[in-house]
């Protein structure tokens, strides 16, 4: 006979059912695809600093120094949007329900919320980045196309820093798998790939985002039409994706119905601080 736990352990629920899936299905990775230095300052805003370009002069040795005024520009990202989860669990109470059952509710809701957060972040990249249009890629051309775009990216940003990652969706990853040049991450099999590092192109890590292909013009405020969304090349410092907190909890014995209630909230904000550091490869797009 199964043992029914008489009390839910909130620490156990978080450690075993929430924490393992908080980031596992999201391709927005600090330091790789997002800026890792955004500082959360309160419940409604985060702050980051854009470093000014250094000034280097040339001339005769021993000449007088010429001072240059340099510093950082402080900018604020508003955290004025949030994702919420509110799930009724009728007749579910701690006295009669195993932790494992409630844990499955938490896991499913956490995964769905984080996937939605990741999708919105990808949509912000596509909406605010620099679109690079061209002929649709194939399994024979995608590798070379990415190499050429990386070269253009690094040339345009020679004084700011090179790209840090390439984000691909299911269709682009399928083309890369069929190409002869692509070296897939040996730690991942073709049948178990999740969002995350899947290989390298032009020396850059390739990050898989399974919902990239789902982005349509209706998800973008800056475009009325878009087709052939293939991949994104970016430098992580150019994309700001702060979350002030990720909150999930269970309200036991709700007064409004017999049972408990699962609630969750993720306040967030997205901003591309430098569109020249985000290349979005598309077949065509029409600005709004």
Image: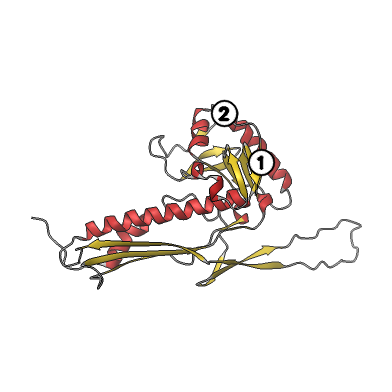
Front residue of 231 and 13: 231
Q: CA distance from mark 2 to mark 1?
A: 16 Å
73 over 199 or under it: above or below: below
Image quadrant in which the N terminus is located: bottom left
Tell me if residue 23 can be seen. Answer: no
Q: Which mark is residue 132?
A: 1
Give residue 154's quadrant in the image.
top right
Disc 2 is placed on an element classified as loop
Residue 254 spot, x, y in % from top left = 25, 71
- Depth check, front residue: 227 or 24: 227
Dot 2 or dot 1: first in sequence order is 1
Q: Is residue 29 above or below residue 198?
A: below
- Residue 186 location, x and y as percent? 45, 36
- Residue drawn at x 56%, y 29% is 181
Q: Which mark is residue 154?
A: none
Label 2 close to label 1 by CB (< 8 Å): no
> In the structure shown, which secondary structural element does the residue marked by tag 1 occupy?
strand
Give the residue drawn at x 60%, y 28%. 141
Q: Residues within 10 Å of mark 2 (few under 14, many from 20)?
A: some
In the rendered image, residue 149, in percent from the top left (x then y), is placed at 66, 39
- Name the residue carrying label 2: 138
Q: In which image quadrant can residue 48 be found?
A: bottom right
User: Which residue sits at x=66%, y=41%?
Assistant: 132
């Amino acid at each position: 006979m199964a043992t029914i736990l008489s009390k839910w352990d909130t620490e156990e629920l978080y450690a075993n059912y929430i924490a393992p899936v908080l980031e596992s299905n999201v391709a927005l990775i600090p330091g790789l695809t997002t800026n890792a230095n955004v500082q959360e300052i309160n419940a409604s805003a985060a702050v980051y600093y854009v470093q000014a370009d250094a000034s280097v002069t040339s001339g005769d040795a021993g000449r007088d120094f010429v001072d240059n005024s340099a510093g950082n520009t402080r900018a604020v990202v508003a955290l004025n949007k949030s994702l919420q989860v509110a799930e009724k669990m009728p007749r579910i109470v701690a006295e009669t329900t195993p932790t494992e059952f409630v844990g499955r509710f938490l896991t499913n809701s956490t995964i769905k919320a984080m996937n939605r957060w990741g999708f919105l972040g990808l949509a912000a990249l596509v909406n605010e980045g620099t679109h690079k249009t061209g002929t649709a890629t194939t399994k024979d051309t995608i590798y070379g196309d990415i190499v050429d775009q990386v070269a253009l990216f690094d040339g345009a940003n020679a004084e700011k820093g090179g790209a840090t990652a390439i984000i691909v969706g299911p269709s682009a990853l399928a083309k890369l798998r069929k190409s002869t040049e692509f070296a897939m991450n040996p730690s991942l099999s073709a049948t178990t790939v999740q969002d995350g590092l899947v290989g390298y192109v032009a020396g850059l890590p390739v990050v898989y985002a399974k919902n990239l292909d789902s982005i349509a013009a209706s998800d973008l405020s800056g475009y009325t039409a878009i087709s052939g969304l293939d991949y994104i090349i970016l430098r992580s410092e150019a994309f700001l994706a702060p979350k002030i907190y990720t909150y999930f909890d269970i309200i036991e014995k709700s007064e409004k119905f017999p049972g408990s209630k699962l609630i969750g909230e993720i306040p967030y904000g997205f901003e591309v601080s430098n569109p020249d550091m985000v290349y979005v490869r598309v077949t065509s797009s029409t600005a709004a």
